[in-house]
Amino acid sequence: MPRPEHGLRPAAETFEYAGCQVSVVGFDEIVAAAADQPVDLLHDAALPSVIANARLSISAAARDGQPAYLLDTSMRIGREPQPAFGVLGRDPVGVLLARRAAAGDDWAIRVVDGVGAAVSEVSRWLGRDRPGSTSTAREDEPVRSVVRTDPATGLRATVTYHRPPSRFAGGGPLVTAQAAVPSGQLSPKHLVAMLGVVLDVAGRAAGGERPHGEYVLSRYPMGPSSAADAAERVTLDQVGGLDAVVAQFRQIAVSFRHPQVMARWGARRPQGILLYGPPGTGKTMLARALAAEIGATFREIRTPEILDKWLGGSERNIKRIFRDARRYREPTVMLFDEFDSIISYTGAGMDAASQAINAVAGIFKQEMNDLIEENPNVIVVATTNFPERVDDSLVRSGRFDIKLAIPQPDHTGRAQIIAKMIRQLMTRHETAGFRMFADDIDVDGLATASAGMTGADLKEALRRAQLAKAMQEARTGVAATPINQHDIADRIAELRHATTR
């Protein structure tokens, strides 16, 4: 008899708070995870559109020498974009350029950047400050703080408003808030009270109307979602079987989020990361998870964006990609997936194709030499299944400071991956009237049955189990029973048989 694996389905507590319904899912799991690293709690919240990049996290800390948990939130308040450095004017052309640049139009951004750079150079030559700025003001510098107290829990949160960025389309002021709760006193109500601070700030920014609706505080994204949405929402908490890699990625994220501290010590965070290993081990997923951990935009560079059949086309494409990267105003993770197929480099070929590849590789090396100095918002991740096909000079330290092997998971790793995948599916799809998985799931037994498989294989086995239940219900019109241990084991055996034929 398989041994049931308890604890896969997280418990949920629901509260009414200021007209909102707030659910805290898996509180014990949240607290346990926060003892090791910060845990993001706010996923896809329906906040007013004026709020950008809202985050709410919990982490272990010490206050007055006593163990405590730190609740931390930050959000950027958007604003109507203004022409860069005031040089575009209020005429129709200037307003149109400003709006198109704020919307991310590459052509408009290049025009605005060019005009702004020219004005900045003239201002420095004349010995004047840039229009609309002061020589002593720093972006995101704290300007005022207020303390908000929740009467029900006694939670005291210090809310700090920071100076807004001066560069074009950088958004409005950054708002941060922190509160500390002694370890023995923390409860789900404290998390709800901290969310109340977020809603209060969001309501004030939106003109005084407090947000309403349902909010969920959880380690994982909640609610039904498409497969594409689920892929986009991956976080480091969801990565199983790679504890050492995840820990290193968390350190990278910390260095990325605290540029002032890094600058004070003259320390440079990693500029590039090379991930290599067998197919299906989670290299691309790790890059997406790093972007989520940083709070960055994820930009994947695909082969067709670089390789061009026309002479000189590939070289122009790689230059354009890095030229655009130097203009990104938000934190960005750039992924060069299947790096060896995009920029293979032998250095020995003399035919036209080899010379073109060598030229692209040479440009890539030049662009990586000073990317972090020109735009510290960007970090580059490259993945490959065949590291021996990539020339050492392309990935030397200074270009790619970190090189990590991503191996096939062992027994413990597979058990972690299966448990996390099942827990995520439960969180996203199970409702009060629907259960996706039975209570007899034994992840240790499934890990034994799936020896030699990768994370991608395990994900496919679960997909097949889900599809079989959905098709059964669709054909018969009768609700299918939850997926059980036998269902998943059968799909694993089926997949193993298909790959060994």
Image: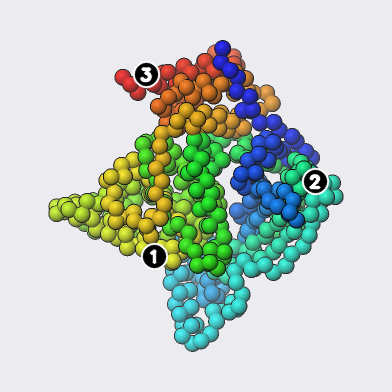
Residue at the extreme left: 350
Residue at the extreme bottom: 126
Dot 1: element: loop
Q: Measured from the top left, where is residue 199 in percent x and y?
A: 73, 51
Query: Which label sits in the foreground, 1 or 2?
Result: 1
Residue 18: mark: 2
Query: Mark 3 or mark 2: which comes first in sequence?
Result: 2
Residue 432 in the figure: left or right of residue 2: right
Query: Mark 1 or mark 2: which comes first in sequence?
Result: 2
Q: Measured from the top left, where is residue 309 in percent x and y?
A: 23, 51
Q: Nearer the viewer, residue 205 or 134?
A: 134
Query: Which label sits in the foreground, 3 or 2?
Result: 3
Dot 2: element: loop
Q: Which class describes the residues within 10 Å of circle 1: few (<14), some (14-19), or many (20+)?
A: some
Query: Mark 3 or mark 1: which comes first in sequence?
Result: 1
Residue at the extreme right: 151
Residue 241 visible in the displayed image: yes
**Relative to 322, residue 120 above or below:** below
Q: Measured from the top left, where is residue 81 in percent x and y?
A: 58, 65
Q: Quadrant of the C terminus?
A: top left
As shown in the figure, which amino acid type bears the numbered disc 2?
Ala
Q: Which class describes the residues within 10 Å of circle 3: few (<14), some (14-19), or many (20+)?
A: few
Q: Which residue is mark 1?
A: 370
Q: Nearer the viewer, residue 152 or 202?
A: 152
Residue 497: mark: 3
As shown in the figure, which amino acid type bears the numbered disc 3?
His
Q: Measured from the top left, where is residue 204 in percent x and y?
A: 74, 58
